[in-house]
Amino acid sequence: MIRLGLLVAALLLARAVGYPSRVDCSEAVEIGQYWMGALSISSAERTVSFTKNGAAVACGSTYESGATYAATLSSTSGYYLFDVSGGAFVASGSCSGARAESSGSELTAPDDGSTMVLVAAWASSKGQVKITPSCSLVAEEPPEPAPVPAPVPAPVPAPVAAPVAEPTVDTTECSDSTSWYYKKSKKTCADYVAKKSKYCKSKIKDDSDVSALDACRYTCNTCEDEDEDDGCSDSTSWYYKKTKNTCADYVAKKSKYCESKIKDDSDVSALDACPITCSSGCSVSCADSTSWYYKKTKSTCSEYVAKKSKYCKSKVQDDGGVSALEACQVTCGTCA
């Protein structure tokens, strides 16, 4: 009798240990395991699934690396046990995070790109253990690397030209400057201005604001026809638009033509070319104008132009069209 009692107790213990929730960690949750007095079988009566933030995640879809998911079973009656590979149950997990006994147990998705597979073993009361179909999630495809922009070459600093002495214009003898050039050293009076007369303009200037008209006097034919007595006379070659509109035949007829805006093709004004007719440069000594100003009455030769040499330009003009170069001769160094 004693032996029979021990045998019955052993059989009952074996059946109890066979419950899914008491499966040893060394035993795989799979078909063909001897549990509950019989071999476990496959069954689709119940299914497992993943949820994330309460929303179902379809089996076969992707998971977010390192995100938190929950394991669920379609029916939780009887006994059941979850088993996951590729992820790990957290607070409620056992067997190093591979097992859990509660539907809704949270698990963490892997971060190594492995597939996360969930399965459950379940049994109604003391019946045969059944294995659910597995539910798998695969890792999201890594985003394509951002296009690498082509290397941008480091900016090459522009060569700094050595300081060039300001071109000097011979005032005693009419000749071209040998040091003046326009933008590039090869664009000199002889190699640039002499090739086209249109370059004989006041706006063609070097870095020191010296124009081609001043530097290339011989080439541009701007040498003054100095009178032996007073060094002042009208130009005999200047004309306005038409060859007949000279100092004598055009400007002398109406004083209104004695303006800085009345210019020939070389940008020489009637005031400069016809000093006798316009009385603009014969009897008056070289001095800055005391009445000229630029836009505002306080912007005079002494209070405005003298402060910055860049204002010594033909485009800086008063309301009458008289430029700073003409009005502020001492300040701008334009005395004839």
Image (tube, grey):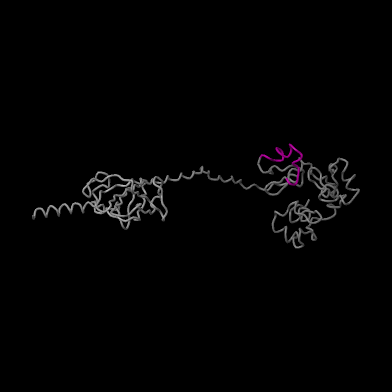
Quadrant housing the N terminus: bottom left
On the image, the x and y values in percent for residue 17 come to: 21, 53
On the image, the x and y values in percent for residue 114 come to: 35, 45
On the image, the x and y values in percent for residue 69 come to: 38, 53
**Residue 201 colored in magenta in the image:** yes
Q: Nearer the viewer, residue 28 or 214?
A: 28
Q: Residue at x 78, y 45 (%)?
A: 267
- Left or right of residue 218, residue 255 in this image: right
Can you name the residue that lies furthest to the bottom here? 298
Q: Nearer the viewer, residue 74 or 227?
A: 74
On the image, the x and y values in percent for residue 195 come to: 73, 36
Which stretch appears magenta? Answer: 186-203
- Left or right of residue 228, residue 214 in this image: left
**Residue 304 colored in magenta in the image:** no
Q: Nearer the viewer, residue 304 or 218?
A: 304
Q: Residue at x 70, y 42 (%)?
A: 178
Q: Quadrant of residue 322?
A: bottom right
Q: What secondary structure characterizes most of the magenta part?
A: loop
- Left or right of residue 232, residue 298 in this image: left
Q: How many marks?
A: 0
